Image: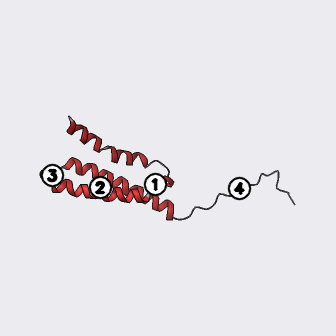
Amino acid sequence: MASLLARVANWGLPLAALADLKKDPEIISPKMTVALCFYSMLFMRFALQVKPKNRLLFACHFANECAQLIQLARFLKHKYGTPQPMKQYQVPSDLVQSK
């Protein structure tokens, strides 16, 4: 039972990352995102090196790796992407003087 619980709990990380894809990119921590990318890459490699291969662990960390890379791309686009033009305020028509 504990093994099943550990397998299910392991999916919490990628599920949380997938849920965060809908949030504002302003709150993304680039340091944590990069750390989670390396963490998932390490465990993907581990999952394929152990005997027998742990494909469920590999799938879990593959999903997390994909989600973290998307988050990192969202952060980079938000931070360094093309700047958005400033919103212009419209002057109400009754304040505009006609000539």
Of all residues shown, which one is farthest toward the right?
99
Residue beneath label 3, please?
53
Residue at image x 46%, y 47%?
Answer: 22
Mark 4 neighbour class, 10 Å CA radius: few under 14, some 14 to 19, many 20 or more = few
Q: Position of residue 84 (x, y in %)?
A: 58, 61
Mark 1 neighbour class, 10 Å CA radius: few under 14, some 14 to 19, many 20 or more = some
Residue beneath label 4, please?
89
Residue beneath label 1, please?
28
- 81 over 68 or under it: above or below: below
Q: Position of residue 13 (x, y in %)?
A: 34, 47
Left or right: where does residue 8 sit relative to residue 35?
left
Nearer to me, 28 or 66:
28
Q: Could you give the CA–CA distance between mark 1 and mark 2, rounded to whole angstroms?
A: 18 Å
Q: Nearer the viewer, mark 4 or mark 3?
A: 3
Residue at image x 22%, y 47%?
Answer: 56
- 14 over 38 or under it: above or below: above
Mark 3 neighbour class, 10 Å CA radius: few under 14, some 14 to 19, many 20 or more = few
The secondary element bearing badge 2 is classed as helix
Contact flag, marks 4 and 3 (Cβ < 8 Å)? no
Amino acid at pointer 4: Tyr
Name the quadrant of the N terminus. top left
Mark positioned earlier in the residue sequence (3 or 1): 1
Instruction: Tell me the quarter of the picture where residue 49 sits.
Output: bottom left
Q: Could you give the CA–CA distance between mark 2 and mark 3, rounded to whole angstroms?
A: 16 Å
Mark positioned earlier in the residue sequence (4 or 3): 3
Of all residues shown, which one is farthest toward the left?
51
The secondary element bearing badge 3 is classed as loop
Mark positioned earlier in the residue sequence (1 or 2): 1
Amino acid at pointer 2: Ser
Q: Could you give the CA–CA distance between mark 3 and mark 1, rounded to whole angstroms?
A: 33 Å
Residue beneath label 2, please?
40
